[in-house]
Image (cartoon, grey):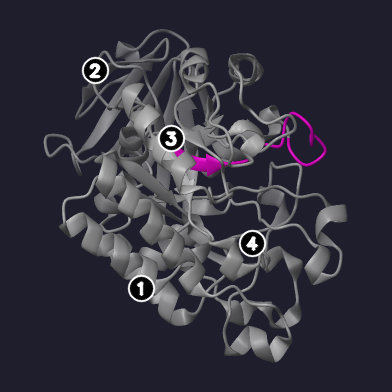
Amino acid sequence: MNLLIKSVRIIDNNPQVQDKVVDIYIEGGIYKKIAVSISPTDCKKGTEVFNAERLCISAGWFDMRVNFREPGYEQKETIASGQRAAASGGFTGVALMPSVNPVLQTSADMEFVKTKSRNGLTDVFPLGALTVNREGKDITEMYDLKQGGAVGFTDDKRFIKDSGVMLRALQYANQIESPLIVFCDDTSLSGNTSSNESEVTTMLGLKGSPGVAEEIALLRDLSLCKYTGVGLHIAGITTKGAVEIIRQAKKGGMPVTCEVAAHHLVLTDDSLEEFDTNFKVKPPLRSKEDVAAICDALVDGTIDVVVSDHSPEDIESKHVEWDYASNGMIGLESFFGVMNAALSGEISLPQLIEKITVNPRNILRLPHVEIKEGEKANFTIFNPDVEWTFSENHLQSLSRNTPFIGYKMKGKAIAVGNNNQFQENR
């Protein structure tokens, strides 16, 4: 990749470069020169020139929660199609959930993912299953998995009911210096339902999952976190009560971080009135009050990361009655337009970008990505102000399970660069 990016505004938490408008010359996938002005004549012959006037550039975006369905469910998404969807949405790196068939729980599984994703623009970092077959009973061979390439451990959206197993998992993860990601849902209370317990869902005749199911499970895990002193990352925060619990835990100095999915910033349980199964997700869509609390928590730093929770499902899994439909929606291509529309004007652009660049990489203990001479070029070029309408033409995923078709977006990923590759998304 030999590329000259002209007149681009840098968005970075480094005050030395933040908000500067510069030209950036990339040669062979490496930042060769960053200056106020660089002439094409000073670049290697054949260098592509990209006019980025009124556009922004940041470190490549990173999504901490995606499902690509391979192996086992390739008709829904392959690793290759998932990488294309990620690049289209502006992501140069993703953390892959282990919820496939067979479950990603051996070093050979890690090698499979790395081999399949090796030539893509978007880096794929596999997460290993925390317990064997994600059944919550026996811890996997975590050390071998880490040696094989696992960047962390999780049972995805399965709550580990056995407190003893969770305690041992925390202690062992600490020994091998690997992050642990947990999902909080006391299924004895939620009953594994996928709608919020509220007046809206009661009127619709849907079985509801109370917010307290999330909060009680969260309190258990935070108690173990406090007892061991071992850090923990909480996935899928959705309730006002959970936000306040984490806020107080952080004030008390506990080593805890958390994330929210982009669709939980804008969609509420009011969306279920038409019984459109594209709105059936886990955790379920909550109330307007919960959504407001989530957005406030992103602004004040209680919530560290925003994820897409990209969950592809084929038509056979979605075009059925509500109770039989699979959970999940795709979210990579629509991600930034949804998140930015929800938070624009509420949070500064550098703070927003930090939640999809710096914070997820820090939590997973991955190398920091910098826009700096001599560093590998890993970047996202985007327009935070453009307004546009999301359509099926914007989808690269093999699945189409999204409620955002026809949705008014604000902000768009225009181009991405990584692994000596460059792609425009216009």
| Residue appearing at x 71%, y 50% in the figure | 393
The answer to whether residue 345 of the structure is visible from this angle is: no
Q: Which residue is mark 3?
A: 169
Query: Amino acid under label 1?
Result: Ala
Q: Which residue is mark 1?
A: 293
Query: Amino acid under label 3?
Result: Ala
Q: Kindly report the distance in space between the C-alpha atoms of the residues bearing marks 1 and 3.
A: 31 Å
Q: At numbered mark 2, what does the secondary structure look like: helix, strand or loop? A: loop
Q: Start and end of the magenta stretch?
A: 62-77
Q: Kindly report the distance in space between the C-alpha atoms of the residues bearing marks 3 and 2.
A: 41 Å
Query: Could you tell me residue 13's position as x and y percent?
Result: 20, 41
189 vs 306: above or below: below
Q: Residues within 10 Å of mark 3 (few under 14, many from 20)?
A: many
First of labels 2, 1 by sequence position: 1
Q: Which residue is mark 2?
A: 373
First of labels 4, 1 by sequence position: 4
